[in-house]
Image: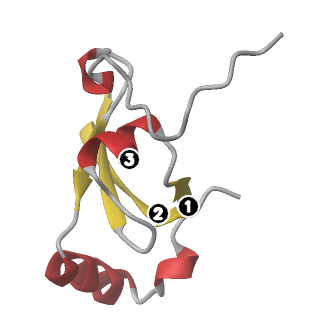
């Protein structure tokens, strides 16, 4: 039997305290526009992240927002990735 978590209930822990969870930053509209222009892309061309993702919920991102994910890398130090927030399918 699988226990379902209510969509309204927020987790009782900080997901960013776990060492494997990368930093997520909600971009302001001007920053998002700059990223789209820099890479000559449209929002739907960015990899998606669901609005129900615990990290997305923790930063308060809504569908249509762009999130910058900063991952630690042994070779590059830090690497930036961008995700387009979409509704849960």
Q: CA distance from mark 3 to mark 1?
A: 11 Å
Which residue is denoted by mark 3 in the rendering? 56
In the image, is residue 13 above or below residue 26? above
In the image, is residue 13 above or below residue 89? above
Is 28 in front, or is 89?
89
Helix, strand or loop at mark 3: helix
Crowding at mark 1 (Cα within 10 Å: few <14, some 14-19, many 20+): some
Examine the rendering and report whether any part of residue 11 can be seen.
yes
Which residue is denoted by mark 2 in the rendering? 85
Determine contact: label 2, label 1, CB under 8 Å. Answer: yes
Horizontally, residue 85 falls left or right of residue 21, namely right
Residue 17: quadrant of the picture: top left
Which residue is denoted by mark 1 in the rendering? 48
Quadrant the C terminus occupies: bottom right
Residue 19: quadrant of the picture: top left
Q: Residue at x 30, y 40 (%)?
A: 58
């Amino acid at each position: 039997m699988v226990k379902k978590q209510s969509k309204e209930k927020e987790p009782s822990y900080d997901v960013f305290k776990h060492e494997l969870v990368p930093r997520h930053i909600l971009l302001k509209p001007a920053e998002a526009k700059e990223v789209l222009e820099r890479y000559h892309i449209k929002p739907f061309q960015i990899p998606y992240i669901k609005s129900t993702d615990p990290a997305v919920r923790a930063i308060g991102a809504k569908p249509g927002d762009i999130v910058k994910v900063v991952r630690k890398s042994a070779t590059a130090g830090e690497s930036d990735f961008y995700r387009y927030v979409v509704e849960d399918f």
